[in-house]
Amino acid sequence: MSFRLLTVSALALGFVAAAAPLARAQDAATVERAIAVRDAALTSNIALDYVTQLTTRFGARPAGSKSEQDAAAWAADYLRAHGFQNVRIEEFPLVGWERGEGSAAIVGRNAQSLVAAALGHSPATPRGGVEADVVRFSSFEDLQAADSATVRGKIVYVDLGQMHPMQDGSGYGPHTRVRGAGPGVAAAKGAAAFIMRSVGSDEDRMPHTGTTRYVDGKPTIPSFALSAPDADQVSRLIALGEPVRMRLTSTARTYETHSQNVIGDLPGATRPEEVIVLGSHMDSWDLGTGAIDDGAGGAITVAAAKAIADSGRRPARTLRVIFYGSEEVAQPTPQTGNGGGVYARNQGAALEKHVIAGESDFGADRVYALRLPAGAQGSDFQKAATRVLYPLGVLASDQVETDGGVDVGPMGPLGVPFFGLAQDGTRYFDLHHTANDTLDKIDPAQLSQNVAAWAGLLWLIADSDVDFRAMRPATTTATPAAH
Amino acid sequence: MSFRLLTVSALALGFVAAAAPLARAQDAATVERAIAVRDAALTSNIALDYVTQLTTRFGARPAGSKSEQDAAAWAADYLRAHGFQNVRIEEFPLVGWERGEGSAAIVGRNAQSLVAAALGHSPATPRGGVEADVVRFSSFEDLQAADSATVRGKIVYVDLGQMHPMQDGSGYGPHTRVRGAGPGVAAAKGAAAFIMRSVGSDEDRMPHTGTTRYVDGKPTIPSFALSAPDADQVSRLIALGEPVRMRLTSTARTYETHSQNVIGDLPGATRPEEVIVLGSHMDSWDLGTGAIDDGAGGAITVAAAKAIADSGRRPARTLRVIFYGSEEVAQPTPQTGNGGGVYARNQGAALEKHVIAGESDFGADRVYALRLPAGAQGSDFQKAATRVLYPLGVLASDQVETDGGVDVGPMGPLGVPFFGLAQDGTRYFDLHHTANDTLDKIDPAQLSQNVAAWAGLLWLIADSDVDFRAMRPATTTATPAAH
């Protein structure tokens, strides 16, 4: 797919005619310059170089692993080499999780191997594995309602069916509830282990890992995700009236380590203390190489900032690129946690000068909508942004950006507003958290469209005095969903 | 995709006008009956039931494994239950191969896991694996020409680039040469191990296994296939100027076992000694569940024969369905080998009454061409067959069917002619020999089109006296390619 800019006549029809007198920040010269930055970024940017080097040199980058640490050091050098200033690494302690070896199989009648993966932070099985009969549930509610007698000593299998692909990714939520809370519910009823259909929209024989939750600070029972074809298979066997008995093994372990945020600035020309945060995360799940989750986000944000730096004029405010560590972690605590929480806590009073924050953590497919704080609906800023973004196929959304995402989210309750450039997630959950999250899945044309959208929007924000804090609603409900 | 029959007017235009007086075997009544059988098979057949039960109950069915044996016993029962007669299991000894555990990783600088799989019949590594520097070749010829000094003690990596998808599957050949002969060439130059880009047209992070060849009856060096994204990764690292060192482990082993052919007949009404063979194979590679390779072939052939049995009239000649054992075997010998060779040898003089043979072993996507023996070009039989098949989208090919395929192929040098119903292989090598070869990859509409094409064609052959032996060329070159 390639992104051609719409012609000026289409634009004029839709927007120029309706343009009210712009506030100083969104005057014609600023918009013109944003359009120029956008167009330059669309045709030339460093995003593909960054994500190619990152994923090729370091492969998977699990939170707290040596490869995440090495990648952070390399990324800091990359920022310095591209003109970012005040580049620093913000370390924090972490309980890491390592998959080790694992297996899943039907044993006895209809014996066959299954393709499964332990869920993040789930504990190991005893040596030799867990072997037990399988009891199947087709909803979380059915599992919750089940009598302990039917579950005790069994392997609990939850199959909600295939996740529905949606452009905005909204098919994900109902399934993550099973992944997060299912093992704890099964454990409380005496289950020996937990296995679920992968949270994904594909039919590849690849499990989707992802984090599960501890209960009372402790891991519960060994927990696994089964690939979609294997989930079909197990459910079909049960439908054929066959008894299903499984053996599950896992040598997963936790260990003390550290993760880190990598931070680099393009200082503002006239109001450098006013900071705009461009977030993404450095860690990935261990099965793939974290190209779409979230090497792409780093690529988009660093390339957008670089495109502005290369425009020949420095905007008024500071652009801060942050590659957060440990986004995928299960158990953020005040002592050990995810990079987003660490950054927000460490900033202290400096957060008051954080103008706005956004993150890119939904792959590399095209941006289709701009979301702003509640008070920005119908504002001159939104109109100016639409002039810059609509030719890329990005519409102004009437959905308000309230939570920002896992990485920038912790700044929300501390007063920082958010913007969101919503990406097309239709195929995101085909790949997410699987071995298939590799570089080849990134479409360079769509990656560049992302960079152009970020660069154009950021110019408007950074070279203006628009006050997003004034546009925030009085109260926020900052409960970011895990990505 | 669904297959609608073309309208009668299109047919009349193309074929009825040109129809010469048909030989007795291809008279109007026979063609009419073939068309009725075709249409009944298109809308109702047992193919999906067969392949669903087979792949669900037994999963992977490696040659000589208990699951292949169990599946054979089940399939014999399935044939009996569907009215086939003289159902029998023809056992033969076999050296089986079991994958065990394996791993591949880059170690040292740029350390990362790789997704790879041992090639069929390759030997285990020593305990602890093989660790060595990698030397890359981009062609088989470059490997052949290499000085032993550059290869000795190294891991030889051959990357021919992505296989090209072709409708007729012709992209496969150049790559199988590397898989079959590459390890032997590398071993002769003192290489420690061999790894190649998977033979496949996909960009999934799944290795394609497949058989490699022994040299002088002995396994050579541990040999692996690397998934396409990992092959890209390794080649990119080398292009970045990075040294690449790998560790490869495999616990593969061979063992004495047996495989078997499953044979069932629909005896002919008037000339039952004249046999038409409908071949496919029961074994699969161990990574997937053998849905497209080759559960689908069994499904298509058994369903086509059953459609004829259900037509209310039994044709003159015998239809013989054979689910061959051990098609994927590396090393057929007079003592231990593949099912096709065993059947051909055991038939002895009865082969003289084998009228023709065909096999279905290229997935479940639609049939697009009919191939016949050389002498059938322009024959009345070909014209009649075209009348039956063209409405399904099947053209008469000017390519001659000479080798039949791996399973029926051994009958060729013993005088049996072949037909071929060529299937669309455009996406076949995305899935072939990978874990992704699972039931969900079968499109039920295209599967039914296969059944209809087989049923219509078989009626013409079975209820006629057409003599394909008279249409064979004087000499044949029967060197079937491995599937």
Image: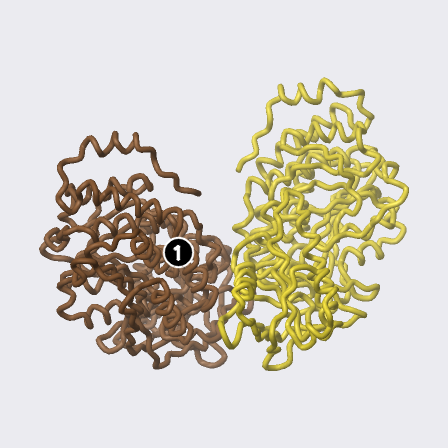
Chain colours: A yellow, B brown
Is residue A367 in sight in this rendering?
yes
Report the number of numbered marks.
1
Q: Position of residue A275 (x, y in %)?
A: 81, 44
- Quadrant occupied by the N terminus of chain B: top left
Q: Position of residue A415 (x, y in %)?
A: 87, 46
Q: Residue furthest front?
A: B312
The residue nearer to you, when weighing B375 against A423, is B375
Q: Locate residue A263 relative to residue B401 in the image: left or right.
A: right
- Quadrant occupied by the C terminus of chain B: bottom left
Q: Position of residue B267 (x, y in %)?
A: 23, 62
Q: Residues within 10 Å of mark 1 (few under 14, many from 20)?
A: many
Q: Locate residue A119 relative to residue B445 in the image: left or right.
A: right
Label 1 element class: helix
Q: Locate residue A10 relative to residue B338 in the image: left or right.
A: right
Is residue B159 in sight in this rendering?
no
Residue at (84, 35) in percent of width and height: A375
Quadrant in the picture for residue A247: bottom right
Determine the chain carrying the residue at label 1: B
Vertical placement of A20 versus A431: above or below? above
Vertical placement of B457 versus A4: above or below? below
Which residue in the protein does label 1 denote? Answer: B47
The residue nearer to you, when weighing B86 against A356, is B86
Q: Locate residue B347 relative to residue B153 in the image: left or right.
A: left
Vertical placement of B154 versus B175: above or below? below
Kind of residue sitting beneath label 1: Ala
